[in-house]
Image: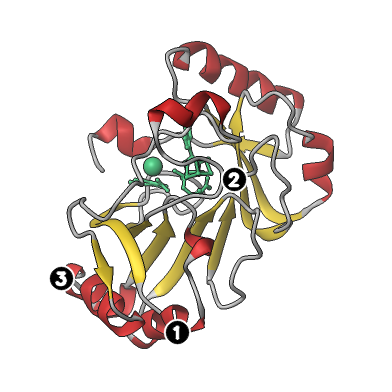
Amino acid sequence: MSYAVKEMFLTLQGEGVQAGRRAVFVRFAGCNLWSGREEDRATAICRFCDTDFVGMDGAGGARFADAAALAAAAAAMWDGDTAERFAVLTGGEPMLQVDDALVDALHAAGFAIAIESNGTLPVHPGIDWVCISPKAGSETVQRSGDELKLVWPQPGSDVDAMERWDFAHLLVQPLDDPHAEANRAAAIAFVMQRPRWRLTLQTHKMLGLR
Ligand SMILES: C[S@@+](CC[C@H](N)C(=O)[O-])C[C@H]1O[C@@H](n2cnc3c(N)ncnc32)[C@H](O)[C@@H]1O
Ligand SMILES: Nc1nc2[nH]cc(C(=O)O)c2c(=O)[nH]1
Ligand code: SF4
Ligand SMILES: [Mg+2]
């Protein structure tokens, strides 16, 4: 199978329990909850997306002919200790494209693999670190993993149900939109009400990283 990748870049993981870790980000093109076109945003299932995932025209983006080609490109970005190789598969929705061949090729290249997924599709069982970010108005079928990252506020979210799912870490991330300051306060209030949850911030945005 070939893979449509919007962009690929070396940075620090900005969010979640792995924040601060060096990582190659592979941003897959396309999502099942929004077309990515601004004219469709108001009618999409997921309306707050902060990411351009349309096309393959970003830095490091391409249509990779096969898994070996994608893994080789990711490995070429990692100019350090190969023992620490870490890839974050995101998008768009990566589970629309991630398959056995890609997981095997990245592992063969020495990468531990993390994923950022909306949870509407089962995550590949070979992934080493599973982050699910549920979206109100969609069905979260992937109800287990390493971290659940709830963007907040998000009306229509069944937080009590999420607390019955099987995640090692429960995280709440302030919604980045024109009301960011109020959203941060709401996320802090959320954790004050629900001490099983922890606040996570989009540190790459504060640091000027990609
Ligand atoms: C762009 S999404 C791609 C992966 C996948 N489609 C998902 O939604 O999890 C990456 C992460 O950014 C989060 N995110 C997207 N837009 C955001 C925003 N405006 N503010 C805060 N987090 C946001 C998502 O919830 C997800 O955790
Ligand atoms: N540095 C950095 N960390 C991130 N963590 C999750 C991201 C994403 O867009 O999936 C992201 C991103 O876009 N950049
Ligand atoms: S599900 Fe993820 S990639 Fe898709 S529109 Fe929502 S935040 Fe963006
Ligand atoms: Mg992002």
- Give the quarter of the image for residue 73: bottom left
Badge 2 or badge 1: first in the primary sequence: 1
- Give the quarter of the image for residue 173: top right
Task: Tell me which amino acid carries mark 1.
Answer: Ala
Task: Tell me which amino acid carries mark 2.
Answer: Ser
| Residue under label 2 | 133
Dot 2 and dot 3 residues touching (CB under 8 Å): no
The quarter of the picture where the N terminus appears is bottom left
Counting from the top left corner in percent of width and height, residue 161 is at 83, 42
Counting from the top left corner in percent of width and height, residue 79 is at 15, 70
Q: Tell me the crowding category of disc 2: few under 14, some 14 to 19, or many 20 or more residues within 10 angstroms, Cα based.
A: many
Which of the labelled discs sits on residue 79, or is there none? 3
Q: Residue at x 53, y 72 (%)?
A: 127
| Residue under label 1 | 101
Looking at the rendered image, the disc whose residue lies closer to the viewer, 3 or 1, is 1
Q: Residue at x 43, y 52 (%)?
A: 30
How far separated are the C-alphas under marks 2 and 1?
25 Å
Label 2 CB-ligand 1 distance < 8 A: yes
Viewer-nearest residue: 40 or 57: 40
